[in-house]
Image (tube, coloured by chain):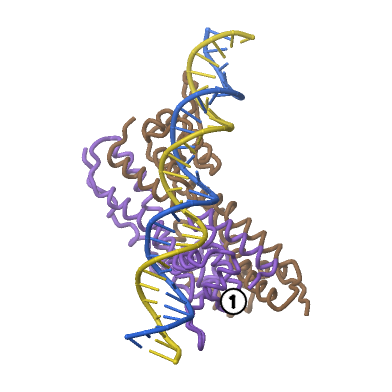
Chain colours: A purple, B brown, C yellow, D blue
DNA sequence: CTGAATTTTCAGTAATTACTGAAATTATAG
DNA sequence: CTATAATTTCAGTAATTACTGAAAATTCAG
């Protein structure tokens, strides 16, 4: 297992990039290797290709598994485990986003929600809560939107993205239709989103 | 400068979260403090509130500045510099996304582009390039979309997000209109996006 | 200019995170 | 079962990153 310069370069880049995220170099490189590999690889092959210790590879794979970014399979007449990356880049993208949301967004959202439940005991806290609420509402909206979008077929999503901001044209159109039709157009989700859940009792 | 438990909690949470990203604990806490603070703070106040050394605060502020997440101002009859976070959460969100794109996406995109320019020298590299191309195309599309969306007014964006996947209804509608109108509906950006720039000469 | 106030830099050190090799555990072929 | 192959764990160590205090540099009022 030695990599071509092309693959080598890709793998090294991902290692560097990985460390800009929370992910460490090792994990980034392992993932990149699996991603470009034509066939599933076993841990020893990975260790050899990347010059890592066998145990390091084991840990890296475990980490990738926790991100749901690897597939595990067995080959006939071979006891070893073989790893590969999902082929569909859209699926990878989605998994990554989901997992990041779970780890980075959800805890923050729940912390904010909790903090907003309590009545502020003074003017200072009132302002702190105000700021927290602004952040909470934005994150919550983005999260809900993301949830929706996640359900779309990659093709639909792709189509939407390629349209770019042109969708706003349809928004305007919608508004006109609403007027014409006397407000009977399909309602947006705006109403649902405006729950008062983050509006605590004001203590003044 | 001592924080209320509410603010304290927020600041600590952000410190933890920061370290899940590339950002370190110190920087996360400083930002959180500025974010909830009612008034701009100088470096000494920050150092005292968070129990960091003055020099650590100086470095943290420099880091935040490089992310364009702080505003700097002066108070009358005071030589010290006062820092604050922008008030508009949408603007913050956008700046953050922009900056992350610049640091994490753009380098990857350009590495991929370069790698896809060269003619593959064998079957293995052909496959590697195929995978790289898939990744490149997805990232490029997402980036272009993001660029577009970034130009929208926060209100429009908010409206779009609240609609969630309902916009797809309009997509379908558009397709029908197209058929009815004999293909004279506004074109999407699909054509522009399908540049052959990442299709290198095949060497076989 | 001068000197005090303020900010930045940086070498040294502390703390954290990454990595290894050896040993323990688990899985499976015979 | 038993023996061996494969994987995981983990204590120790290496490497990296974060933080501090002291000194240098910068800013600015007088």
Q: Point out the image quarter for the N terminus of chain A.
A: bottom right
Q: Chain of mark 1?
A: B
Q: Is residue A179 at least partly visible in the picture?
A: no
Near-viewer residue (A25 or B177):
A25
Q: Is residue B74 above or below residue A1?
A: above
Relative image position of residue A149 (x, y in whole percent) = 46, 68
Relative image position of residue B114 (x, y in whole percent) = 71, 62
- Quarter of the image holding residue A62? bottom left
Q: Residue at x 69, y 63 (%)?
A: B113
Q: Is residue A148 above or below residue A87?
A: above
Relative image position of residue B109 (x, y in whole percent) = 64, 60
* Crowding near the residue tagged with mark 1, few <14, some 14–19, many ≥20 C-alpha atoms within 10 Å: some
Near-viewer residue (B52 or B133):
B52
Q: Residue at x 27, y 40 (%)?
A: B5
The answer to whether residue A15 is left or right of residue A194 is: right
The mark total stands at 1
Q: Point out the image quarter for the C terminus of chain A.
A: top left
The answer to whether residue A96 is left or right of residue A123 is: right
Residue where numbered disc 1 is placed: B178
The answer to whether residue B68 is left or right of residue A188 is: right
Q: Is residue B106 above or below residue D7?
A: above
Q: Is residue A193 at least partly visible in the picture?
A: yes
Q: Is residue A109 above or below residue C4?
A: below
- Quarter of the image holding residue B39? top left
Near-viewer residue (A170 or B46):
B46
Q: Residue at x 40, y 59 (%)?
A: A103
- Quarter of the image holding residue B137? bottom right
Relative image position of residue B154 (x, y in whole percent) = 48, 52
Q: Which SS class for mark 1?
A: helix
Near-viewer residue (B154 or B110):
B110
């Amino acid at each position: 297992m030695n990599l071509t310069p092309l693959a080598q370069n890709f793998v090294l880049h991902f290692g560097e990039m990985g460390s800009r995220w929370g992910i460490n170099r090792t994990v980034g490189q392992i993932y990149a290797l699996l991603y470009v590999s034509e066939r599933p690889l076993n841990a020893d092959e990975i260790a050899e290709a990347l010059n890592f210790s066998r145990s390091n590879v084991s840990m890296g794979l475990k980490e990738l598994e926790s991100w749901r970014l690897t597939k595990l399979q067995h080959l006939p007449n071979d006891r070893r485990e073989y790893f590969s990356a999902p082929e569909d880049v859209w699926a990878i993208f989605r998994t990554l986003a989901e997992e990041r949301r779970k780890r980075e967004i959800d805890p923050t959202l729940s912390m904010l929600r909790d903090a907003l439940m309590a009545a502020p005991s003074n003017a200072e806290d009132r302002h702190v809560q105000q700021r927290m609420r602004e952040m909470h509402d934005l994150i919550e909206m983005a999260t809900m939107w993301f949830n929706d979008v996640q359900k779309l077929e990659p093709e639909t999503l792709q189509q939407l993205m390629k349209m770019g901001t042109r969708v706003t044209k349809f928004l305007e159109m919608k508004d006109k239709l609403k007027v014409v039709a006397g407000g009977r157009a399909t309602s947006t989700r705006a109403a649902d989103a405006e729950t008062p859940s983050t509006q605590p009792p004001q203590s003044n």
